[in-house]
Amino acid sequence: MPELPEVETIKRGLLPLIGSTVVSVSTDSSLRFIQAEKAKGRSLEDVKRRGKYLIFKFEDLDMMLHLGMTGALTFASPSRFRAQWVFSSTTLTLTDPRGFGRVIATSPGDYSKIKGLSQLGPEPLDDAFDVKLFVDSMSKYGAPIKARLLGQKSMAGPGNYICDEALWRARINPGVRSLTPAKARKLALELINVMEEAIQSGGMSMRNYVQVDGGTGSAQNSLQCYGRVGLPCHRCGAALVKTRVAGRGSTWCPRCQKL
DNA sequence: CACGCCTCCTGTGCGC
DNA sequence: TGCGCACAGGAGGCGT
C-alpha cells in the first residue's frame, strides 16, 4: 500500500481542496467506505496525515482514510470506485481494487475508537521524534525486528519496502529479535532517511500508487534492496534473497545482513 | 500482554 | 495461448 511517503505526497496534493465544500458523495455501499458520505455538505478545513492515515478535518467532523494495500486517491473520474467526493471545484475519487482500505468518521480529535490510530507510534519525521525511545524498544528481545516495525507501535509509517530498504542500509537481518543500541540508532536514522528521500521523489510507484493528479513518483528508481531478489547486492555483490518474515515477503542480503 | 496465525479481496505475473 | 496458483506496499481479530 501507500506507506508514509506516499500518503504524505497525497496529502500535499490535497491541500488545494482546503476551503471548498463537499457538494455530494457516492460510495460503493460497502461498510468499509460508507462513512465517506458523512462529509456531504461540509467544508474542508484542513488535511493532515498521521502514520499512513489521511485525516480530513471538517468543522465538526474528522474523516479518517486508510488506503490499505491498493487504495488510490485522485482527481480522475474512473467508472469503478469505492468513494467519490464531489467538491465545488473538483471531484476526488477513491479507488481500491482489493478493498482493504477504509473510511472512518469521528468527532474531531477523537481517535479512541480507531485502534490503529490510538495505538500508533510517534511520527518519525517530527522534530520531536525521540530516537532514544525507539532504541529502547528495539533493544528488547521479542518478535522479529521487521514484524515490530510493521506493527506501527514503535514508529508510525514504515511498510514493507521502507523496512526492507532501511534494514539493508543498516545491515540488519529482518528476522533479528533484538538490536544493540548502536544498531537500533542506525536503523532509526535509515528509516527516516528512506522516508524523507521517498517524499522528495514523490513516492514509490512500483505498483499501483499514483499521486492525486495521476502522476507517478520515482522513489522506485533508487531502491537498493526491495524488489531486487536474485540481483547482486549493491554493496557486496552477493545475490539478494527473499524469505518470509512476519508473514511478509522480505528481501535482504545474505552476506551484509547475517542473522 | 505479546506474539503469530488467519482473514478480508481482487488483480497480476509467472511457470507449466 | 491459456490456466492455475502464489503473491501483492496492511492491519484487525482471535487463539495461545
Image (cartoon, coloured by chain):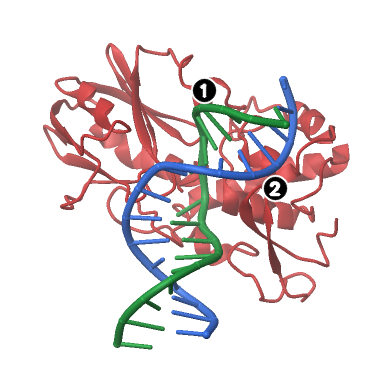
Chain colours: A red, B blue, C green
Q: What residue type is labelled 1?
A: Lys
Q: How crowded is mark 1: few (under 14 residues within 10 Å), some or many (20 or more)?
A: few
Q: Give the chain of mark 2.
A: A
Asked whether A131 or A226 is in front, the reply is A226
Q: Quadrant of residue A30?
A: top left
Q: Quadrant of residue A255?
A: bottom right
Residue denoted by label 2: A190
Mark 2 vs mark 1: give the one in front.
1
Asked whether A105 or A184 is in front, the reply is A105
Determine the secondary structure under disc 2: helix
- Disc nearer the start of the sequence (2/1): 1
Give the residue displayed 20% in from the left and 26% down from the top. A37
Residue denoted by label 1: A115
- Report, in whole angstroms, how far the alpha carbon at label 2 lies from the one at label 1: 27 Å
Q: Position of residue A239 (x, y in %)?
A: 73, 75
Determine the secondary structure under disc 1: helix
Q: Residue A215 carries which label?
A: none
Q: Is residue A103 above or below residue A28?
A: above
Would residue A143 appear left or right of A200 to someone viewing this image?
A: right
The image quadrant where one finds the C terminus of chain A is bottom right
Asked whether A110 or A35 is in front, the reply is A35
Give the residue displayed 43% in from the left and 12% down from the top. A110
Give the residue displayed 36% in from the left and 49% down from the top. A98
Give the residue displayed 51% in from the left and 22% down from the top. A115
Q: Where is residue A74 in the image (x, y as percent from the top left)?
A: 27, 47
Q: Give the chain of mark 1.
A: A
Q: Quadrant of residue A131?
A: top right
* Total numbered badges shown on the rendered structure: 2
Would residue A104 appear left or right of A80 to someone viewing this image?
A: right
Q: What residue type is labelled 2?
A: Glu
